[in-house]
């Protein structure tokens, strides 16, 4: 471990990483630059696909690459002689549970649903609570729509929006832009006012003061149903009946939405699964045993996955099983892979469908 550590420090000391923040033109051309005069090879990798792309070195040791990108938010990193390196000059970062990468935004004309616009904005709040199920102190993020007041008489429907394995409770806001999306859709009259709750989906204990003891997937369900939901329903003006609760999620969160949402149709009427397959055989069997009852309770069951996603085959199989069982649902096989590029678009498409 020490040898690897010192070699890495020595390597990084031999290159001058003095990158320029990527230049994004109005037509979507993005210029990436990295100054590394002692490097033999620099590759660029982004979540737009295409793998690692070689950059071109000039006489000054500046590596450059131009790429044409569609309006979206992208993450990227450099591979400098085999060592993954983030863009030190770019303060816009994608930070998750494990990985850190640079982030760029290519604006659209007209603006994309997640772009900042001159419209009324809601609030984003972080709630800290003691979790009996997880045995630690945790947080969840809440979006309240423009004009919401804690003492208002009108109660709003609530969406529980779940993140993926590599993310945290703030990811849907920080990188998914769920709050800006909701602001824009509300301003355009395309969605119903709602409160969006974004919990921490991992049940790992923190390294301090207690050590990790596995993923404990059942703990999150208990935490959501028995702790988070009661806190939300006490602290916020939300409706508490089944027709006005939704749960949606991406990847790991999509699997959780399948198990929790479809496994508790007495609590949830809208379920969205992004880039995930339902592996809970007990829930699937219960749905197939009485499809008429499930269809009556489900107001929306929406499934989507990118066709370049490694899990697309499993999602397609789940779709086929649901169809065979007679469970009404929408299925979308979109372009792209297992990335936020798809998940933002899925959320923008599904928010207007909720609570209609």
Image (spheres, helix red, strand yellow):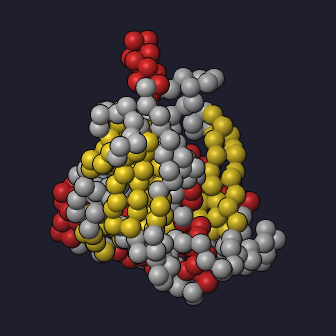
Q: Is residue 45 above or below residue 3?
A: below
Total numbered badges shown on the rendered structure: 0
Asked whether residue 208 appears in the rendered view, the answer is yes
Quadrant (top left, top right, bottom left, bottom right) of the N terminus: top left
Residue at (39% x, 12% y) in the render: 3
Pick whichever, 264 or 233, lies toward us: 233
Location of residue 9 in the rendering, given as x and y in whole percent from the top left corner: 46, 21
Nearer to the camera, 288 or 268: 268
Left or right, 327 with reference to 137? left
Name the residue at 29% across, 38% down: 41
Q: Which percent across, then down, holds residue 200?
A: 55, 47
Q: Is 114 on the left or on the right of 325, as rendered?
A: right
Above-or-below relation of 149 to 257: below
Q: Going by the picture, which residue comes out furthest to the right?
A: 151
Answer with left or right where residue 43 lies relative to residue 229.
left
The percent coordinates of residue 335 (x first, y second) are 26, 68
- Expressed as whole percent of the image width and height from the top left, the position of residue 355 reads 52, 79
Name the residue: 48% across, 83% down.
Answer: 110
Q: Nearer the viewer, residue 1 or 80?
A: 80
Residue at horizontal 25 percent and vertical 55 percent from the top: 50
Q: Residue furthest bottom?
A: 189
Of all residues, the one furthest to the front in this rendering is: 59
Question: Between residues 134 and 263, which one lies in front from this camera angle?
Answer: 134
Q: Residue furthest top?
A: 2
């Amino acid at each position: 471990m020490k040898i690897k550590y010192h070699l890495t420090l020595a390597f990084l000391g031999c290159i001058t990483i003095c990158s320029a923040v990527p230049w994004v033109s109005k037509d979507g051309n993005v210029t990436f630059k990295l100054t590394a005069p002692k490097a033999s090879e620099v590759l660029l990798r982004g979540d737009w696909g295409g793998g690692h792309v070689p950059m071109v070195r000039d006489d000054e040791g500046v590596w450059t690459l131009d790429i044409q990108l569609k309006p979206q938010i992208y993450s990227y990193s450099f591979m400098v002689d085999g060592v993954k390196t983030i863009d030190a000059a770019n303060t816009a970062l994608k930070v998750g549970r494990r990985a850190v990468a640079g982030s760029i935004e290519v604006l659209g004309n007209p603006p994309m649903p997640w772009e900042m616009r001159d419209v009324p904005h809601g609030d984003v709040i972080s709630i800290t609570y003691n979790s009996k199920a997880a045995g630690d102190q945790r947080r969840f993020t809440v979006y309240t729509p423009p004009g919401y007041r804690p003492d208002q008489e009108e109660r709003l429907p609530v969406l529980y929006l779940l993140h993926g394995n590599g993310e945290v409770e703030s990811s849907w806001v920080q990188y998914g832009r769920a709050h800006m999306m909701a602001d824009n859709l509300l301003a355009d009259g395309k969605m119903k006012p709602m409160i969006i709750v974004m919990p921490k989906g991992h049940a790992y204990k923190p390294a301090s003061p207690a050590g990790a003891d596995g993923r404990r997937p059942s703990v999150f369900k208990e935490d959501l149903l028995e702790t988070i939901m009661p806190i939300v329903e006490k602290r916020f003006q939300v409706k508490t009946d089944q027709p006005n609760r939704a749960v949606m999620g991406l990847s790991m969160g999509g699997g959780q939405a399948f198990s929790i949402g479809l496994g508790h149709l007495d609590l949830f009427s809208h379920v969205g699964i992004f880039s995930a397959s339902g592996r809970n055989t007990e829930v699937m069997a219960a749905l197939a045993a009485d499809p008429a009852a499930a269809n009556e309770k489900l107001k929306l069951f929406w499934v989507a996955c990118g066709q370049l996603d490694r899990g697309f085959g499993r999602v397609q199989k789940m779709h086929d099983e649901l169809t065979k069982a007679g469970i009404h649902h929408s299925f979308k096989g979109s372009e792209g892979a297992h990335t936020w590029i798809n998940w933002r678009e899925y959320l923008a498409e599904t928010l207007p469908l909720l609570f209609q």
